[in-house]
């Protein structure tokens, strides 16, 4: 009898140790997925469109070096900053190069921290990236730009909305496929895209990610930014977005306290609105900037 109890205890202890190991490893993996900047790039530059450009760089307030491309336009005091989404870089904003530049604007397209030509860094999915956008705005100001607009997609849209909350030099924001709140979006990405089981790994993974990085995900909600500060915002979102549901766009629109317009593009998936409705997207964007960048 005693031997049976001893064997049961040993099995229980071993299972407990195994569960603990799996739990810790799974939670660490969840935190890695949360923090890792998955780097991808396209073999495209402004020269692919026949547009001359300058390679530029500048520091954020926490001394991180941001790289970008400056496309000089004919409007000497007007600039549009392009901000990419997660797992991308400035090359992924190439669809905007021509029609924004052809309208005469100076264009600054940047790599967010951890992406593109920048040094390796964890991503904060807009918590710190809003500082990258603000650094780009300051760089444009130092080049003499007085009227500055921003176009951001997905994480870039969220980062741009958060930057505009505190930066009055941003006169207008075009937000494409942005999330309204960060944590619910992180849960969707972790579970549906990276296939990390929610319980118990995701909650603990988020805790570890915050502990390791110092990021405060609860503070990175674009819906709060548009409530607090009235600034012009043009919102695009596809009604077939499987990554960030279109309800996010509707919530941001309802919460926005400044001039606002929302355009839901039929059948478009995540960051596909420009591809599915190019003429409308370009016309609405240029009209928006013509109205507010003056």
Image (cartoon, rainbow, N blue to C red):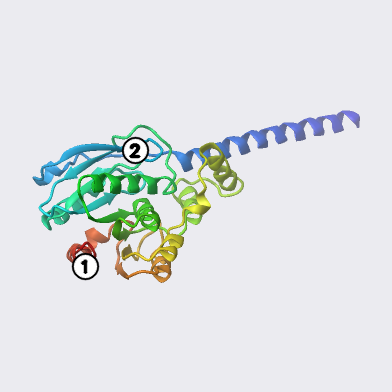
Picture coordinates of residue 83, whole percent (x, y):
30, 49
Residue 39 numbered tag = 2
Does residue 103 appear left or right of residue 239 in this picture?
Answer: left
Picture coordinates of residue 134, whole percent (x, y):
34, 48
Picture coordinates of residue 119, whole percent (x, y):
35, 32
Q: Determine the image quadrant of residue 226.
A: bottom left
Relative height, residue 159 to residue 18 (above, below) = below
Relative height, residue 238 to residue 83 (above, below) = below
Q: Earlier in the sequence, mark 1 or mark 2?
A: 2
Q: Nearer the viewer, residue 62 or 2?
A: 62
Picture coordinates of residue 40, whole percent (x, y):
31, 39
Looking at the rendered structure, the number of numbered marks drawn on it comes to: 2
Q: In the current view of this chain or complex, which residue is farthest to the right?
A: 1
Does residue 45 appear left or right of residue 130 in this picture?
Answer: left
- Separation of marks 1 and 2 at Cα, in angstroms: 36 Å
Please, what secondary structure does the residue beneath circle 2 have?
loop
Residue 158 numbered tag = none
| Quadrant position of the C terminus in the picture | bottom left
Residue pointed to by mark 1: 291
Q: Please report the residue visible at 31 percent of the width from the left and 44 percent of the height from the top.
A: 88
Q: Determine the image quadrant of residue 58.
A: top left
Q: Please report the residue visible at 22 percent of the width from the left and 37 percent of the height from the top.
A: 56
Does residue 111 appear left or right of residue 72 in this picture?
Answer: right
Q: Determine the image quadrant of residue 53.
A: top left
Nearest-to-viewer mark from 1 and 2: 1
């Amino acid at each position: 009898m005693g031997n049976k109890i001893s064997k049961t205890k040993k099995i229980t202890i071993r299972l407990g140790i195994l569960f603990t190991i799996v739990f810790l490893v799974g939670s660490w993996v969840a935190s890695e997925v949360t923090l890792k900047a998955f780097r991808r790039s396209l073999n495209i530059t402004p020269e692919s469109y026949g547009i001359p450009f300058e390679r530029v760089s500048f520091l954020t307030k926490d001394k991180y070096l941001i790289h970008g491309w400056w496309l000089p336009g004919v409007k000497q005091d007007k600039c549009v900053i392009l901000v990419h989404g997660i797992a991308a870089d400035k090359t992924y904003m190439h669809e905007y190069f021509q029609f924004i530049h052809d309208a005469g604007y100076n264009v600054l397209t940047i790599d967010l921290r951890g992406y593109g030509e920048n040094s390796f860094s964890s991503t904060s999915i807009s918590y710190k990236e809003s500082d990258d956008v603000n650094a780009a705005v300051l760089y444009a100001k130092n080049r003499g730009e007085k009227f500055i607009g921003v176009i951001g997609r997905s994480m870039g849209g969220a980062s741009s909305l958060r930057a505009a909350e505190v930066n009055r030099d941003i006169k207008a924001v075009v937000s494409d496929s942005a999330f309204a709140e960060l944590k619910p979006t992180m849960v969707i990405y972790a579970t549906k895209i990276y296939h990390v089981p929610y319980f118990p790994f995701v909650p603990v993974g988020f805790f570890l990610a915050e502990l390791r990085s110092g990021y405060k995900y609860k503070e990175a909600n674009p819906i709060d930014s548009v409530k607090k500060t009235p600034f012009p915002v043009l919102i695009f979102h596809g009604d077939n977005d499987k990554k960030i549901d279109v309800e996010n766009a509707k919530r941001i629109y309802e919460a926005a306290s400044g001039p606002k317009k929302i355009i839901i593009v039929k059948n478009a998936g995540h960051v596909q609105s420009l591809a599915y409705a190019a003429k409308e997207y370009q016309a609405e964007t240029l009209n928006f900037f013509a109205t507010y960048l003056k």
